[in-house]
């Protein structure tokens, strides 16, 4: 899940509610944004989502991968994209 989707899906709870319902919030396996006086102070993220985010951050460090992504986006913008179906057929899947 992307960081933006985590933020959009997050349930807002105030600090007192978070303290009283911490076990429930953790078991819910959905993100929660903890607010103090209406301002975000903490964020509870399910473990699997956090692993996805960390993996994404690691990918951002890979200059070669970023170059490939930039080239692919440029080719796509020029209409050089092929359908997944055609690609899989070409690859023998």
Image (cartoon, grey):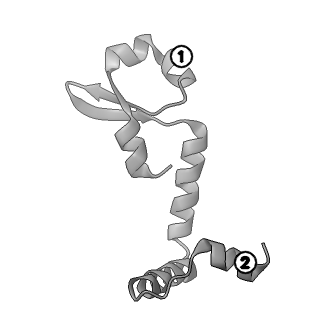
| Residue situated in front as seen by the camera: 34 or 85 | 85
Which quarter of the picture shows residue 32? top left
**Residue 81's spot in the image, x, y percent?**
51, 83
Residue denoted by label 2: 89
Label 1 packing within 10 angstroms: few (<14), some (14-19), many (20+): few
Point out the residue furthest to the top here: 20
Point out the image quarter for the C terminus. Answer: bottom right
Label 2 packing within 10 angstroms: few (<14), some (14-19), many (20+): few
What is the C-alpha distance between the residues marked 1 and 2? Answer: 48 Å
**Residue 18's spot in the image, x, y percent?**
40, 18
Locate residue 77 relative to residue 67 in the image: left or right.
Answer: left
**Kind of element beneath mark 1:** helix
Q: Compare marks 1 and 2 and give the one earlier in the sequence.
A: 1
Which quarter of the picture shows residue 46? top right
Q: Please state which of the two labelled residues, at mark 1 or mark 2, is closer to the viewer.
A: 2
Residue denoted by label 1: 23
């Amino acid at each position: 899940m992307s960081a933006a989707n985590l933020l959009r899906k997050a349930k807002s709870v105030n600090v007192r509610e978070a303290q009283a319902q911490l076990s429930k919030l953790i078991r819910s396996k959905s993100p929660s944004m903890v607010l103090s006086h209406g301002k975000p102070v903490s964020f509870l993220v399910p473990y699997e989502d956090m692993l996805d985010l960390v993996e994404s951050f690691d990918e951002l460090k890979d200059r070669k991968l970023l170059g490939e992504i930039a080239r692919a986006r440029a080719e796509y913008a020029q209409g050089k994209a092929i359908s997944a179906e055609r690609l899989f057929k070409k690859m023998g899947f």
